[in-house]
Structures are given as structure tokens and as C-alpha cells.
Image (cartoon, grey):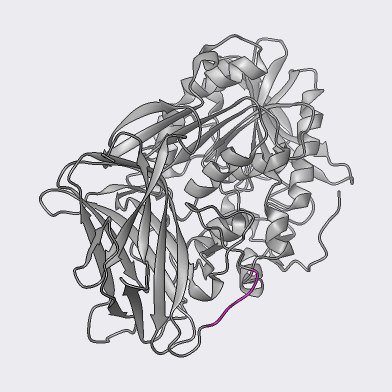
Amino acid sequence: MGFATFELRFRDGLPLEKGKYPGQRPRTETSEGIIRDYDIAVKMRDGVNIYVDLFRPEQPGEYPVLLAWAPYGKHGRIKYSYFPHCGVCDSDLSSLAAFEAADPRYWCAHGYGVMYADPRGAWGSEGDLTLLGPQEAQDCYDLIEWTGVQPWCNGKVGMHGVSYLAWSQWKAAALNPPHLAAINPWEGVSDFYRELAFHGGIPETAFLPMWLPSVSFSKTRVEDLVRMAQEHPLFDEYWQSKNADLSQITVPCFAVASWADHGLHARGTLEAFKQIASKEKWLLIHGRKKWENFYQNAERQRQFFDMFLKSKQTEVRFWPKVLLETRERYYLGNFRPETDWPPPQTRYESLFLDANTGEMGWQKASVEAEARYSTGSGAAGATWVQFDHRWEHKVELTGNMKLKLWVEASDADDMDLFVAVQKIDRSGEIVPFQFLGNHEDGPVALGWLRVSHRELDPERSTPAQPVHSHLREEKLKPGEVVPVEIEIWPSGTLFHENEILRIVIQGKDIYTYPHDMNTNAHTVTVNRGDHVIHTGGRFDSHLLIPVMAESIPE
């Protein structure tokens, strides 16, 4: 395996005692029908030892193993109480369950082993801790292959879990370890530049600094992801090294995405599903709380793993390729099957912005107009603009939206644009939706763009989904009006007659939760002065929407 030539920045690991690390104590215990092997040393191909805990049924036999790979600490137990309203109580799961991972109490009772690993450099494992790079993927491959030939394993390993535990699945599966039989990535980033560290080229400044300490407990050194993001503001070899070659994934896959995880996992899971080469793959898309949804779907997960890790003929044979939820509001929606993602019957239609009326319509206004908002603190005048479209018929919008704008910065050479799609009910109230893991008043969808990053990747962009290259900055000239295309992350929403589709545009975050652990934000912007949006006449500013066939008349 070739490794990149850029220089990684490290910082000292956090003291293990602050993470309540019990220390290495290799031992075997048995209780409640589960054999518990702690601190098993597994040697990587270069001689470095990592440590794992294994839980397996007490009854002798060979069992498939579900591997959870993340640097949060295999000794750590559930801390969902840190996230109010997340839908999971610490007491809902057994004392053996690790964060975002399979609960051994459930899986061992159904004839599975569960393995938690401390990756290289994490906690008591040897070496330096790097995050989602080639070394970690190689180590995960080695552990899978070691596990697959152990006497207590039936030769089949599955990977399972939420967030980081999903990210690591993309990386390991792309290397195709022979004993990896199936993966179940539950909401996971697959493009670490576009989905985690930079949104539309705008640096993320809340989630990364909050999250990094939780993956920094080490006896040695830890990759300083925040500093690396500061030193690598464009998409380069560093960011490419973190992204799996999804086209190499061939293992059976049950992927789960959420409309609710904008700014983190929603885009990455759906992009990965489209790109992986697996012939046997299924997708579930919901709009609910991710941790709650993960544990509530254990039976569905078991149907999948029983088929590919135990060779059972299960209901998976009859699953639709895609099962998605169309939301009406917070926790109100219906699931329906689809044949693919995006749904093949999607019809893309343009709603044109009119700055004269503040509305969006099917026809472009003939008269040119401009909408202006201020980005300065304490400045007079509006700090956002909005455009509304009132529906005359019931309509379902499912998929990516694209916002094309003609923009101008009155006093700057760059602009940071923040976009939210909202649903307004017939009473004029904003309809709330589940957002991230524990917020209950989120938007339909979000989009972002730093205008100097407006250059598109011509190979990856489609008319409905712009993908920006982020390879260079292209600054604005004084008075220059430029077209930009903003990718709005996917959503699935039902609108009724007389409800309103609203687009909000401003120069700062529209939805953020500064006092909560589970948020993202963009507090360092390039904005100064006013932003101007041009519509009508020469300026075809519009919102491209994904209409489900038959849900709106021709």
C-alpha cells in the first residue's frame, strides 16, 4: 500500500486516566451466557499491537463476528445522556455496549460474536493515532483477517455501527479483506473535505473542535485534524487520503442514511451508496434520530447479517432496493419502496426567484431586480433574504435541490453563502423537522458555498447536483456579478396544497446550537458589507427541485 507524502501534524494524546481508562488487564470472564475476553493483543503486519475486546456466546461453537472500529475506547460505555432528546437512554442498553456500536447482550443471544477494537494509537494500543487514513484502513484489514481464522469464528466478519463506525467501514471494505462478508454503515461521512471539515469550502468550526478530544486519548500522539484543516483549506492529497475508493467496494451492503443529518452524514451515505460496486446492496433513508433509529432496527440488521454471515434465507431477499421516508413534519412521515437512488422517476423543475416580489415561480421574471442583505454585525437593514412558493397541489420533493444564484459582493472579494430550505404550513408557521442526532426544530435541507470555490468538477457534477472541485480560489472583482451553483443536501418532504416552500439565504449559519455538544457551525467567514442577489431578465437565479412523478401536474 502506498502512503501519501504530505506531513501529518500531531499533538500529544490526552491522558488515559481522564477517559477513565481501566488499564490493560487481559482476562476472560463469563456471565449471563456471554464469554468476555478483554485486551486481546492482535499484531499488525508491521509488528504493532492493537487491543480488542471480544464478546461471544457461552455455548461452544464457531460464530460470525460483528466488528466495531472506532477510537472512542472499547472500554467506554454508553453516554447518550450527554445528548438531551436523542431518543436513547443509557439504561436502554446493557453495561457491555459501546457508543454507537452493537450491544453484545442482543447479538450474542442470537449467535454472534461482537468485537470492539482500539485502533492503532488509541488508548492502550501501540503506535500513533491517525484518523481515517490509509494506515487505519490497513490495520482494520489486518484485524478482520486475523479474526476470520480464529477457532471461535465461522470465517465471516461483518462491520456494523454509526458515524465513525460507518466511516471505517467504507475504508476497510474498499480494500476487500477476504473474510469481510457484509457491512452495515449507519449514517457515515464518505467525503471528509466536503461533508465534515468544509461545507461548500467554508471551514466548519464547531463540530470538529468538539469532537477531536473524544478521539484523542492516547499514550503517544494523535493526528491534529483541526490544525490539518487549517493548513489544507483546499481539496488536496491529504483529504483524498481520507476518502475510500468507493468503486472498489463489492461486499454486500445495507446502508442507512438520514434526511436529518445535514452538515454531517446525510450526503456521504447517499453518495457512497451510489458509488459502491456491490451487486447486493440496500438503502434505508429515514428522517429520525440516528441513535434511536439504529437500536430500534436491530431486527432488521439481523435479517441482513443472518443472510450473509450465517447463509440463512431471510426476508432480505424481498427487500426493496431502497426504502425511504417522505416526511411531513417532525416524526410524521410514511415509508415507501423505490427501485434505486435517486428515484428514477424524478422530474427536475425550476422555480425562478423574483427579488421584486420575494416569490418563486415557474416563469422567469422579465424585469431584472436585486435583493440585498447585510453581513456586518450591527449593520442596518435586513440580514437575510427569502423567497417563497405556495403550492397549488400536493407535491413530494425527494432528492437533491440546486440553487443557482447570480451574486455580487458590494465591499469584498469573496462571499460565504448559507442556504436553508424550509416548509411553511397553512398557518404561516415554520414546520419543524428532526435535525442531527437530538434537535427537533431543524430545516428541510441545507446548502453552503464560499463563492471563491464556485468552480465545478465537470466530471462529477450533474445538472441536479453541482460538485465543486475546491482546487483553487477564484476571487471576485469589484462590482463583478457571477453565477454560482449551490448543492443543497438531499431531503424527502411532502407539501400539501397552500403550504409554502421557502428558501432562506444569508451570510451566517441559519441553524446552529452553540450550547449543545451536537452541532456544526461556521464562525470564520470571509463576509464584509452587503450581498446582492440578482434575479429576472439576464439573471436566471432559480431553485431546481426534485419532483416525484405524478405528484404535480404537467
Nearest to the observer: residue 366 or residue 132:
366
Residue 223 vs 268, above or below: the answer is below
What residue appears at the point 40 percent right and 81 percent down from the top-left corner?
408
Residue 101 vs 420, above or below: the answer is above
Q: Which residues are magenta?
A: 471-475
Q: Quadrant of residue 537?
A: bottom left
Q: Is residue 539 magenta?
A: no
What residue appears at the point 41 percent right and 64 percent down from the top-left corner?
404
Q: Quadrant of the C terminus?
A: top left
Residue 522 vs 169, above or below: the answer is below
What residue appears at the point 69 percent right and 16 percent down from the top-left corner?
63
Q: Quadrant of residue 343?
A: top left
Q: Position of residue 471 (x, y in %)?
A: 65, 69
Q: Specify whether 322 is left or right of 214.
A: left
Nearest to the observer: residue 105 or residue 197:
197
Total numbered badges shown on the rendered structure: 0
Q: Say whether residue 130 is visible.
A: no
Task: Provide the major secondary structure of the magenta segment.
Answer: loop
